[in-house]
Image (tube, rainbow, N blue to C red):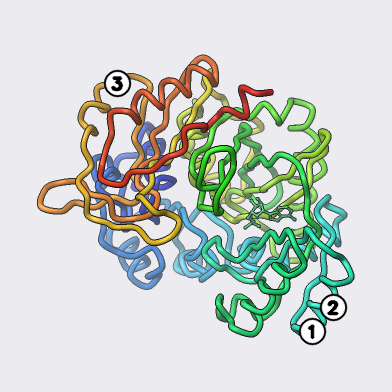
Amino acid sequence: MKVLVVGGGGREHALVWKIAQSPLVKEIYCAPGNPGIAGLAICAHIPADDIDALLDFARAEKINLTVVGPEVPLTMGIVDRFQAAGLEIFGPNQAAACIEGSKSFSKDLMAKYAIPTAAYQTFTDRDAAVAYINEQGAPIVVKADGLAAGKGVIVAMTEAQAIEAINDIMLDKVFGAAGASVVIEEFMDGEEASFFAFTDGKNVLPLASSQDHKRAFDNDEGPNTGGMGAYSPAPVVTAALHDEIVETIVKPTIAGMANDGCPYSGILYVGLMIKDGKPRVVEYNARFGDPEAQPLLMRMKSDIVPVLQACARGNLQQDSIEWHDKAAVCVAMASGGYPAAYEKGFEITGLEEVLAMDDVMVFHAGTTLEDGKIVNAGGRVLGVTGLGDTVAEAIDCAYRAVAKIHWNGVHFRKDIGQKALNR
Ligand code: AMP
Ligand code: GLY
């Protein structure tokens, strides 16, 4: 069969790498892809949000299954368009993707189905929002309702910070229409984890646990980023907690979506805050996490393609995934200055040397080819992912590879995975 992966980051490189190993797959395409993906798939120069062009391409190439990586095409309705054209596609439709695209939608869903999360209220009036902040006090969390490229959440430690965030979003409209309404919620303390489950809209197939590192600098300091590294499994998610998450969060979410007339199929990403062994939802995403997909897919032993097909077809029967009995650690190597402004175009060295290492994959995110050289072209540039018998060995493996790779200004965290060791 022929598979098309939509996207061009580290998550999509990992998906292409995993899908390409399936005996069911003859040809694999990626749009737009990147120089790392180009070693495994035929890359089509189509942006991930150009749905018309993607549809034309899938028809022309007779693609049997399309797999969507990022949230933007999902919230634009790529799944609805492909399905209307009779093409098989993995991911939620536009209505279901609201679970990520609208914070008020997801908060209302959780309230209705008693899914544990932070207390909240939604506001469209600035003065009412400020009055609520004054009443609740700090710390408190302010969220633009719509998609804001991961920047729409402000964890305010003081009331003044929270009010400044309200003014930025509601008066200065820094996130445009995404800030027309605002969710204000209780600050949750604890340890974060990422939880994923495949679903066909009825049945769920949970993945192994993982944990992201959202802050830019060591010891969880600095600004939030798309994720500076991840590991799997995450020991904070014990076997008992895993079952509790499935029963009290994942299953009620999927059943609630179906009951509300917008069944959710694809992969559900639940961002969790765990305090005293109890999980609460921070947010949902309608897609695989990046970087979490990188360590998870390196650990996945089962063929992923039948699972993706079953989700797309609504007949997910499989009740478990086989995992390699290894830990995986992914270190994101970023451009100097990320998540703020950074310079691009520096040559990346050492990639060849890492190719020769066992148990390491370098997933490309923000790279491009310039005069035959691979250069940095985005914030997060590479996801260097290593396997080991233990988290400690996987950390060692990933950082041995990281040490061989260099470009001008390169920046990465030195403590990815340490939380797992500290437990
Ligand atoms: P989100 O985009 O909703 O994932 O939020 C980004 C980050 O903000 C999360 O990963 C958390 O670190 C933090 N965050 C969001 N909501 C809360 C909350 N209610 N309490 C504490 N931290 C939060
Ligand atoms: N790793 C965070 C995300 O994918 O949103």
| SS label for mark 2 | helix
User: Where residue 202 sits: x, y (%)?
Assistant: 71, 49
Q: Nearer the viewer, residue 316 or 40?
A: 40
Asked whether, in this view, residue 310 is left or right of residue 404, the answer is right
Where is 60 relative to 361, above or below?
below
Kind of residue sitting beneath label 1:
Asp
Q: Nearer the viewer, residue 419 or 210?
A: 419
Residue named by callout 2: 131
The image quarter containing residue 220 is top right
Circles 2 and 1 in contact, beta carbons < 8 Å: yes
Find the residue positioned furthest to the top.
389
Task: Categorize mark 3 by other alpha carbons within 10 Å: few (<14), some (14-19), many (20+).
Answer: few
Q: Nearer the viewer, residue 61 or 132?
A: 132
The residue depicted at 48 percent of the width and 17 percent of the height is 393
The image quarter containing residue 95 is bottom right
Labels 3 and 1: the sequence-earlier one: 1
Task: Categorize mark 2 by other alpha carbons within 10 Å: few (<14), some (14-19), many (20+).
Answer: few
Q: Quadrant of the N terminus?
A: top left
User: Where residue 362 sits: x, y (%)?
Assistant: 34, 35
Residue named by callout 1: 127
Labels 2 and 3: the sequence-earlier one: 2
| SS label for mark 1 | helix
Residue named by callout 3: 357
Between circles 3 and 1, the one closer to the viewer is 1
